[in-house]
Image (spheres, helix red, strand yellow):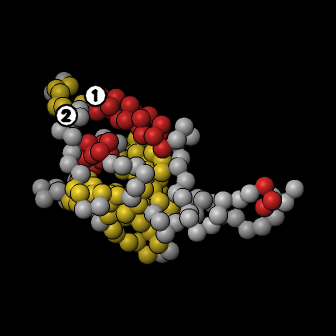
Amino acid sequence: MGFGTYGGGYKFANVANGKMHMKVGDEKKEFDYFDGQLVGIQIIEDTYEEKPLQKVELTLANGEKEKVKLKFTLEAWYSVGFFARIAKIDLTKQFRLGVFQSEKNEKVSFCYMKQGEKKIEADKTIPRPVKKTLGKKVVDDWTDFDTFVDKMIEKLTKQLNPAGVLTVQDDTVPPPTDSDLPF
């Protein structure tokens, strides 16, 4: 047996307060964007302040073989921006996935995307949360958006491949042949 690592060599990042946050060693770092390809997407269960919370987890990779798991809250404005743009991205090519902070609320993050020099505009027709009165409270109802996201993730997963994971092509290493196998 040999050495091994948990996490498959991934770096882990979260979107919060207008930045992508990542811990590198003992140091916390902030980033504005990631350039790479989407290679996987799923909804995961997470917690925030001991309360269950659904998050979107993206698996991203770039040509330099950097692999990142990026998480953001499903029912948040960053998620709305992400899903309003991702259908316009050519998933076979790299793109920039960015984040910026709201001018009105420092805790709110917004998403932007670019592919090459082209800024990806948001699809204004996707469902957005609506205000509903629940008793004496006014709350955001994310039901239609959540349904849209489920369908979009299913579509994206099929585009990536049936298993939901796409490997980034490495042209520097030739694919193995039968003569390379040890048996």
Residue 10 coordinates in the image, percent (x, y): 53, 61
In-image side of 123 versus 71 (left or right): left
Q: Is residue 139 visible?
A: no
Residue 52 coordinates in the image, percent (x, y): 42, 41
Badge 1: few (under 14), some or many (20 or more) residues near its Cα, within 10 Å?
few
Identify which residue is drawn at 29% across, 45% down.
88
Residue picked out by circle 2: 125
- 3D distance between C-alphas at marks 2 and 1: 12 Å
Q: In the picture, which quadrant includes the C terminus?
A: bottom right
Identify which residue is drawn at 45% across, 69% down.
23
Identify which residue is drawn at 40% across, 55% down.
93
Residue 137 coordinates in the image, percent (x, y): 17, 31
Residue 97 coordinates in the image, percent (x, y): 32, 57
Residue type, label 2: Thr
Identify which residue is drawn at 55% across, 53% down.
167
Residue picked out by circle 1: 144
Q: Nearer the viewer, residue 20 or 178?
A: 178
- Among all residues in the image, which is located at the extreme top? 135
| Lower position in the chain sequence, tag 2 or tag 1 | 2
Q: In the picture, which quadrant includes the N terminus?
A: bottom right
Q: Secondary structure at mark 1?
A: helix
